[in-house]
Image (cartoon, rainbow, N blue to C red):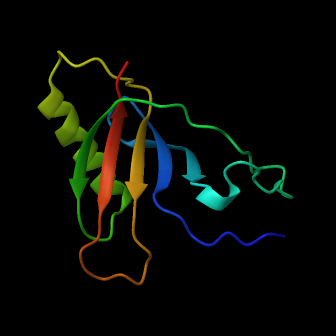
């Protein structure tokens, strides 16, 4: 029953298939605003879980526009190519992040994160 407003980024955990496409299984994460961090409201929907995301080191790439699944897949492929075979990161998932509300037409920011192992 507590409204918290929208936060950024909206972070989607994507699970790539062998061919680089995304599986239908995704996990959407929203940041809890600072004023609720110490004591977040208890979700009334059992499918909503509160998780603490531990600190991590990431490899990231940024792009603009209204991001679609194909954009995230393409930028993930570019990031993978740029990192080559030397970088150690989790290959079974990555994060797709959007920072802007839908009504912002210009200067949009999106990122793909690979988590360093």
Q: Would you identify the image quadrant in which residue 76 lies? A: top left
Relative side of 51 to 99, left or right: right
Residue 18: percent from the left, percent from the top?
37, 28
Q: Nearer the viewer, residue 99 or 35?
A: 35
Residue 71: percent from the left, percent from the top?
28, 56
Q: Would you identify the image quadrant in which residue 64 lies? A: bottom left
- Count of picture labels: 0
Relative side of 63 to 58, left or right: left
Q: In the rendered image of this protein, does residue 13 appear above or below residue 86?
A: below
Viewport quadrant of the N terminus:
bottom right
Q: Would you identify the image quadrant in which residue 6 lies? A: bottom right
Residue plotted at (26% across, 70% down): 65
Q: Nearer the viewer, residue 24 or 57?
A: 57
Viewport quadrant of the C terminus:
top left
Relative side of 42 to 89, left or right: right
Q: Nearer the viewer, residue 37 or 103?
A: 37
Q: In the rendered image of this protein, does residue 56 appear above or below residue 36?
A: above
Residue plotted at (13% across, 33% down): 82
Residue 92: percent from the left, percent from the top?
44, 26
Residue plotted at (63% across, 38% down): 52
Residue 67: percent from the left, percent from the top?
33, 64
């Amino acid at each position: 029953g507590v409204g918290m407003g929208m936060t950024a980024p909206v972070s989607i955990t994507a699970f790539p298939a062998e061919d680089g496409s995304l599986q239908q299984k995704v996990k959407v994460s929203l940041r809890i605003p600072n004023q609720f961090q110490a004591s977040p409201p208890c979700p009334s929907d059992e499918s909503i879980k509160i998780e603490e995301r531990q600190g991590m080191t990431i490899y990231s790439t940024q792009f603009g526009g209204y991001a679609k699944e194909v954009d995230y897949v393409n930028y993930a492929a570019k990031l993978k190519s740029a990192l080559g075979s030397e970088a150690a990161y989790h290959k079974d998932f990555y994060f797709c992040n959007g920072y802007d509300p839908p009504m912002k037409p210009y200067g949009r920011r999106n990122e793909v994160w690979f988590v360093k192992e």
